[in-house]
Structure formats: C-alpha cells, structure tokens
Image (cartoon, rainbow, N blue to C red):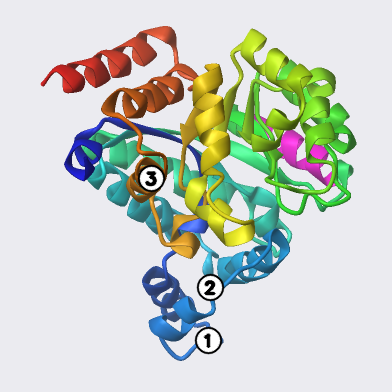
Amino acid sequence: MNEFIAGLPKCELHLHIEGTLEPELKFALAERNGMELPYANVDEMRAAYRFDSLSSFLTIYYEGMNVLLHEPDFYDLAMAYLTKAAGQNVRYVEMFFDPQAHTSRGVPFDVVVRGLSRAIDDAHTRLGIRAQLIMCFLRDFQAEYAMATLVQSLPYREWIAGVGLDSDEKGNPPSKFAAVYARARAEGYRLTMHCDVDQENSAEHIRQALFDIGVDRIDHGVNSLEDPVLVEEILRRGIGLTVCPISNGFVVDGIKGEAIREMLDKGMRVTLNSDDPAYFDGYVQENIEVTQRELDLTRGELMQLQRNAFEITWLPRQLKDAYLAELEAYALS
C-alpha cells in the first residue's frame, strides 16, 4: 500500500510555506544572515518541537521565521519544499504564505513574494511541479492591517491566486474580516479560511465562513460535522475541506480519523495535507500513509481523496482534467 501511495499523483492544498522551514535550512539561513539561534544544533531545535495546542505551536513557528530576511531566503525556502514535494509525486500545490509575519518585522512585501514566485517558476521548469500562492491574513492582528496588506498585494495580483486566514483563532472569528474578504472577492481573489480543529466556537466560525463570508474552501473544518446544516451547505456547494491529519495529532487528541471517514462516507470533498511539515514530522505522503493505516483505506478511497483535491483546486478546468486523467491512468497501470 505504501508503494501505491508513493506513486500516487498528489495535490496539496493546505501547506504553509513558512512551516516547511527545516532546522538544517534554518541554521544555514541564520549563518548567511549573521544571526544566532537559541539552539546549539539541529537535534536540540527538533527537540523543542513539542506542542500540545495551537498557541504553543504558533510561538515556536513565528520565532523560526526570523531567519527569513532577503529574497534568496524565501526562494531557498520554497525551492526546498517544492523539491521535497516533487519527490513525493506532488503534481500541484497551493501554498499559503504569511506576509504580515514578515512585514511586521520590517521585511518588504516585495521581497517575500518575489522570492517565493521565482522558486515556483524554477520548480515548474526544473521539476515539473506546478504551484500557486495563497496570501493569508493573521487573524490575531487588526482587520485594518489585513486590509492594508490586501491593498499592498494588488500590484502582485497575477502571482497570488487567493486569500486565506490563519493564526490564533480564539477571539478572532471570520466576521472580524468580513470587509477584507468582500474587497478581496471584488479584486478577483479566491477565498479560503482556517476553521481550526476543536477551537472555541468552531461550528459557529464555520457557519460564518460559509454563510456570511461565502468562502470557496475551508481549511481544516472537521467540526462542520457537529451541525447537519453545515454539512448540507458544504455538500450543496461542493466546498472542499483541507484536513491535516498529523498536525491534528499534535494539537488535539488524534488525527481525527473518524471525522475523515465520516466526511468520505458522506461524499464531502475532504482532502489530506501536511500543514507545517517541518514542525509536525510529516509531508503529504506521510499524512496519507498515517491516515490509510488508521482507517484501512482502500486504493479506491485513496484515489477519491486525490480526486477531491484536484477538483477543488483553483486551476482552470483544462488543467484539472489533465491531472485527473493522470490520476486515473495511474490507477489502471
């Protein structure tokens, strides 16, 4: 089964590029930029990656970004991930980036987006993997800052497929960003939003995302199963849900396997993704393997998970169909 998973053409839709910053690269960038890290070596840094909640993860996550200062840093970050992903037969990825995590410490927006975009172009040429960017707003900052970041992004519109919302959800509901999302939609961006697992008011936040904001996709979203009205709306609109099994196991109790099974059985467009793989010890292939073992997924169910992912991408129909055809050819090989 693992051999089948390894060869499976894959699509990843919930991947924070800053969350792919492996300790080895972090040390290399720190040396290049003349910085000292609060760890003696890679092993000591990895030993610090022990999280029991979303907030405990975010503390270390944002601290690690400090080594990202210049365009080559962002290029190297994205190229390292895309190389790894291509090696796992990921054919397409829509990757999140957090511009406010960088502009808030003095790194220009232009530096961030140019470094990432250049890596995306080079990876497509050299490795055959295609990618697009999703710009996330940090929900624990003011909505006004998110709006300013949205306006700042407009000259780079051709490089950014859509917008998302991440970081600490507590006390920061989707409704806080309603005006920002309305402007983003008017500017032609696609819309997604984190509704993290087992957070305070999770189901209400999903309701706001669906009915008040009108998102095209929901990141995580497993708590939708608590309310049949939410499930019905997700099914009616064909909304995709980007679930991250291994990261779930770090911040809540287990990978949410039962929820993934229920979503599959209901015909919801659930997908499997890696979230922040450098911190959670698993890229997309490992996430699929873990889920397959826990749920005893069949090859047909693994195929359906990837069909779901390619179908909910923000790609033109022609490219979706090409990837789906590749997937079906693999099943017959």
Q: Which residue corresponds to the image point at 44% horizontal and 25% vertical from the top-left? A: 309
Q: Which residue corresponds to the image point at 54% horizontal and 79% vertical from the top-left? A: 48
Q: Earlier in the sequence, mark 3 or mark 1?
A: 1
Q: Position of residue 39 (x, y in %)?
A: 51, 87
Mark 2 = which residue? 49
Q: State the SS at label 2.
A: loop
Can residue 243 be seen here? Answer: no
- Name the residue type under label 3: Val
Q: Quadrant of the N terminus?
A: top left
Q: Position of residue 63 (x, y in %)?
A: 63, 71
Q: Residues within 10 Å of mark 3 (few under 14, many from 20)?
A: many
Marks 2 and 1, how far apart at CA: 18 Å
- Name the residue type under label 2: Tyr
Question: Above or below — where is 94 with respect to 55?
Answer: above
Mark 3 = which residue? 284
- Name the residue type under label 1: Glu
